[in-house]
Amino acid sequence: MIDTAAKPILILGGTGKTGRRLADRLTAQGLPVRIGSRSGTPPFDWEDDTTWEPALDGVGAAYISYYPDLAVPGAAEAVGAFANLAVASGVRRLVLLSGRGEIEAQRAEEMLKASGADWTILRCAWFSQNFSESFLLDPLLAGEVALPVGTVGEPFVDADDIADAAVTVLTRQGHVGQLYELTGPRLLSFADAVAEIGKAAGRDIRFVRISHAEFTTAVAGYELPAEFAWLLNELFTEVLDGRNEALTDGVERVLGRAPKDFSAYATETAGTGIWSD
């Protein structure tokens, strides 16, 4: 194990899906963490670069998760600037949470590499937890999920697997300069995924394919932050075109085990009652 006990690991997005899980795992191992968020101590804000240096002060490594997603314009430049500052501050060990099939995310990866950091990239498929900890929860509770996507398969990856991978690459030798593409073990369409959730929850939940124009109108009615509304349109109009319709062995390469199947996620999550109407 890498000796990081003396210095905390900075977790940007430390209250998010993967960051929260990563923080819990590191803390359970007795490793110090610093939560990088607007409510953190010190606070961290991607939109205020004066908060970056205090957040980096005294840390040994950083996990970089960009909100709301690396796909948004300007994200790559922000990640590049942060990585450069981290290296200049003596924090060379950087792990980036990236996204599959996103041009801006891959630009951010290249900027991370160019910083001179000891980098590792976790390039991830669509999170299973988007159905329980994000914008898809309310439609599931309402009994109908309407999206502008057809039969394209997505290898949904579990946030627990991502967090386990992040712990491993941050605390063990041999992962510097590695890009791991993390997917689940099988392809499911969004209709398949909704059907599995309905079965696990014991509910009749419909999936309806709608047009992109209908989706854009629906998103506008959600009163979401502008960048998040833009992101949803980008993901469903650009990224979900079949470009990610392939499985990888990234989870197995990092963890030495198979990734968690979506049905296991659905069963476990249904057990919490979150999808009960």
Image (cartoon, rainbow, N blue to C red):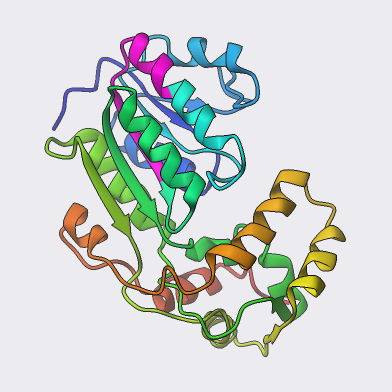
Q: Is residue 42 above or below residue 261?
A: above
Q: Is residue 227 left or right of residue 256?
A: right
Quarter of the image with the N terminus is: top left
Region of the chain picked out in magenta, as a range: 83-97
Which quadrant holds residue 24?
Answer: top left
Residue in the picture at 53% in, 38% down: 66
| Residue 208 visible in rendering | yes
Quarter of the image with the C terminus is: bottom right
In percent of width and height, residue 208 lies at 71, 85
Q: Is residue 228 left or right of residue 78?
A: right
Q: Is residue 157 above or below residue 94?
A: below
Q: Is residue 91 left or right of residue 118?
A: right
Q: Report how many numbered discs are placed on residues in the image.
A: 0
| Residue 13 visible in rendering | no
Q: Is residue 117 above or below residue 271?
A: above
Toward the viewer: 189 or 100?
Answer: 100
In percent of width and height, residue 79 lies at 48, 30
Q: Is residue 57 above or below residue 29?
A: above
Which quadrant holds residue 5?
Answer: top left
In percent of width and height, residue 192 lies at 52, 85
Toward the viewer: 156 or 6?
Answer: 156
The reply to whether the magenta stretch includes residue 200 is: no
Residue in the picture at 71% in, 52% down: 230
Which quadrant holds residue 97?
Answer: top left
In percent of width and height, residue 117 lies at 28, 24
Residue in the picture at 49% in, 16% down: 55
Toward the viewer: 22 or 119?
Answer: 119
Residue in the picture at 40% in, 18% down: 84
The reply to whether the magenta stretch includes residue 91 is: yes
